[in-house]
Image: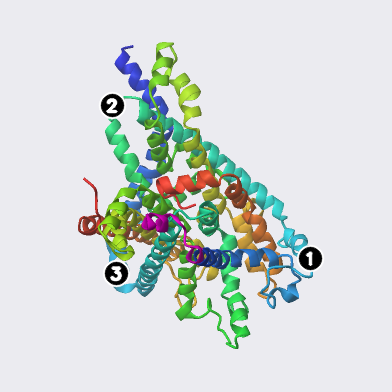
Amino acid sequence: MTTSLHRTRRPVLPSMLKHGLLLLGALVMLYPLLWMLSSSFKPETIIFKDLGLIPRPFTLEHYVSGWTAIGVPFSRFYVNSFIISGLSVAGTVLSCALAAYAFARLDFRFKRLWFALMLGTIMLPYHVTLIPRYIMFFQLGWINTILPLTVPHFFAVSSFFVFLIVQFIRGLPRDLDDAAAIDGASEWQTFWRIVVPLATPALVTTAIFTFIWSWDDFFSQLLYLNRITSYTVSLGLRAFIDSQDRSSFGPLFAMSVISLIPAFVIFIVAQQQLVEGVSRTGLKG
Amino acid sequence: MSRELRRNLVAYAFLTPWLLGLLIFSAGPILASAYLSLTRYDLLSPPEWRGLTNYVVMFTRDPRFAKALQVTANYVLVSVPLQLALALAIALVLNRGIRALSLYRAIYYLPSLLGGSIAIAILWRQVFGLDGLINRALSLIGIQGISWIATPETAVYTLVLLRVWQFGSPMIIFLAGLKQIPREFYESAEIDGAGRWNRFWRITLPLLTPIIFFNLVLQIISAFQTFTQAFIVSGGTGGPVNSTLFYTLYLYQQGFSAFNMGYASALAWVLLGIIGGLTLVAFLSSKYWVYYES
């Protein structure tokens, strides 16, 4: 009797201690981010002197001066990034869903071979195909366009997501497919009307991670875009570092904060999807 | 048209985008890259056959290659274990039916989500710079700090910290793994009088080894390909004194600054070999330490 009482009652002190430590840890983790946010509102002269998180005095000057600091307004980079990320998401979701439906629900010759190849390309480092892809895009005259960054996404090059969606579709009951087939629905109708709506969670996960990856991408953008008007947010920020003298971090911080907004919005809105995506598949974010 | 043929045609119609992608963007480039790695090629004149020369040069006469390999290996060996240990420790604390679990989980995950961006690399450059946040804090207790990113001995460790800071995503994977361990195991162990420490070593850890293994492989592969942060912190040079010359940064320099595209292709194949080799070692060793329920 006493032991069971002992076991159900939560010890107050260790629990508070634990929460205290966890909160402290969370603060340490978030401190650099919060400090950057707050510094972006502080006058340049106190940024480095002030370790505090409340900007006093408060100024918006860095946002104003940062916006146009390298000649082309930051809004341009934002639009460019959105176009590239948006097209990448649309292409990846569509092409990966098509392939995944075939692998999960249809029967065809050489299915196992293709499936094995699909798995094989998941772990392939991007660098092995990098140089020939660059040469190909160079010869097509695609350098300095968004095509090298978007077109491959329409051909399901992120096989990882094909696999993710295949796994998800396999987990869906087949009853609805069968019922649709009896009603005379074609494979296309079954795919579009039944499987796609049911597979929405997997498609949303695919969309979220594709968006964040292409938004944060730096390597390929660095290779393929070298005209300042076609710069993305990543490239704009990088050019900004080079143009600044080392002592003025205010505008750089302001634009960095702006660049993080989309990922942060996704974090707030789709937290559950993110956590599930990571725990189910090991996606990094 | 026979039903058999029709069925195949329909399936291949669905598969077409992926199949074309496989041929045009993966299989073709892989073969081309294997060929280019045996040539000298600068994008403008036709490739010139060199046999295995690129590989021989790499392993015998290229000190920057050796340096890049050493820098990257050191980075992987230090950062991945630290990151996973922290991820596991916090996951264990969070797993005990704690209140506000989802809040903590979200906060600890945020750096993983934002960490790949240029913005965070810029922040890091500032935080560990000469008049950065760290030195400012140190000066409060009377210590005069150095520029951590401009000092060859410390530069790479600022990047190690950046990876460790992103322990949130492996932590989420550990949490998911911990949830799978049946409660009864602990209950019967407790009845048998096993203490907390014993329960961790005898139950939690063995049952978690598949997840540890998964995280390990995943993080090694991703750590080996670190590029953006090293590029931003060192201004694209891999400096100071090549101390942040990560492997992929060196590959980028060879391919796209020096336009040694044959050599860069050879570097890519060696990278594939290393990553494949490490994964293979992990898999082969797994039967000695990874516990699979049969």
Q: Mark 1 points at which residue?
A: A59
Q: Which one is closest to the eye, mark 2 or mark 1? A: 1
The residue wearing badge 3 is B59
Residue A271, above or below B170: above
Q: Which residue is drawn at 65% across and 67% down?
A: A35
- What's the magenta region? A1-15
Q: How crowded is mark 2: few (under 14 residues within 10 Å), some or many (20 or more)?
A: few
| Residue matched to label 2 | A109
The residue at 37%/66% (across/down) is B81
The residue that appears at 48% across and 41% down in the rendered structure is A152
User: First in sequence: mark 2 or mark 1?
Assistant: 1
Which label is found at residue B159? none
Indicate the quadrant containing the N terminus of chain A: top left, top right, bottom left or bottom right. bottom left
Q: Residues within 10 Å of mark 3 (few under 14, many from 20)?
A: few
Q: Which chain letter goes with mark 2? A: A
Q: Which type of secondary structure does the marked residue at label 2 adopt?
A: loop
Cα separation between marks 3 and 1: 55 Å
Q: Is-magenta flag for residue B208?
A: no
Alpha carbon separation for disc pair 2 and 1? 65 Å
Q: Quadrant of residue B248?
A: bottom left
B292 left or right, relative to A203: left
Q: How far apart are marks 3 and 2 (CA)?
A: 44 Å
Q: Residue B122 at what x, y percent from top left?
A: 59, 66
Question: Can you name the residue that lies furthest to the front here?
Answer: A1
| Same subunit, tags 3 and 1 | no
Regarding residue A53, the answer to whether it shows in the image is yes
